[in-house]
Image (spheres, rainbow, N blue to C red):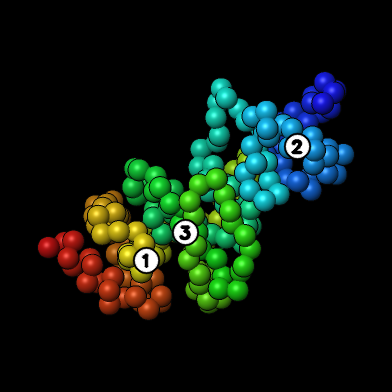
Amino acid sequence: MLLSTYQKVITLFEGGKGYRSAAELKEAKITTVQIKELVKKGIVEHVSHGFYWLIDTENGKPENYKLIEACMVNPRSVICADSACYYHGLIDKEPEVLSVATLKTDRSRMQLNFPVCRHYYSNLAFEQDMDVVETPYGRIRVYGIERSVCDCIRFREDIGGEMLELIISNFLERNGNHMDRLLAYADAMRVGKIVRIKLNQIEE
């Protein structure tokens, strides 16, 4: 690869805060062969189908990069359950598997360089209590904290009992004054009974 082409690619990525889509690279006259060469040399990372990241060995990836990349690859997806609880600061350790909500009719590929668990929602439930957060690297779509706790209880078999207990305990300690809101979401999502049972078990 010519030095001028290499510099052009680097400048292009830097202009996108490190991320670029295959469509943007093609528009800039960067060929597939050139991108594959950069990936092979460890200069660029293939994030997912159609997306790339300029590897920054000094600073690494941005905070919450998994959330950013998931929402980049599928702009209709929403960070949910334990991953949303981590984003909101309800738990300190990032879950090993990223929890993502998509519509039941959404069959977009989400093959990323980290494990993802997809949860499928109906149209009615999908849009409720969703926040859109703008970052320098891209948009994050994430559910609110009360809804996310309800989702954790709903998906308790995927999340695990120990993690669920920690999430509920931390919610009661930090957000106990929002209990009415939590139960309202639980009832709306038709999991009010099990949410109340789990809350009682933790409080005992």
Residue 106 rendering spot, x and y as whole percentages: 61, 69
- Residue 110 position in % (x across, y down): 59, 56
Q: In percent of the image, x 26 and y 59: which residue is there?
A: 161
* Camera sees residue 17: no
Q: Which residue is mark 2?
A: 35
In the rendered image of this protein, does residue 16 appear above or below residue 119?
above
Q: Earlier in the sequence, mark 1 or mark 3?
A: 3
Give the labeled residue for mark 1. Answer: 155
Amino acid marked by disc 2: Ile
Mark 2 neighbour density, 10 Å: few (under 14) some (14–19) many (20 or more): many
- Residue toward you, 80 or 41: 41
Where is mark 3, residue-wise?
A: 117
Q: Identify residue type, mark 3.
A: Cys
- Mark pair 1, 2: CA separation: 39 Å
Q: Amino acid at mark 1?
A: Phe
Image quarter where the N terminus lies is top right
Please give the name of the residue rendered at 33% of the width and 47% of the height, measured from the top-left corner. 91
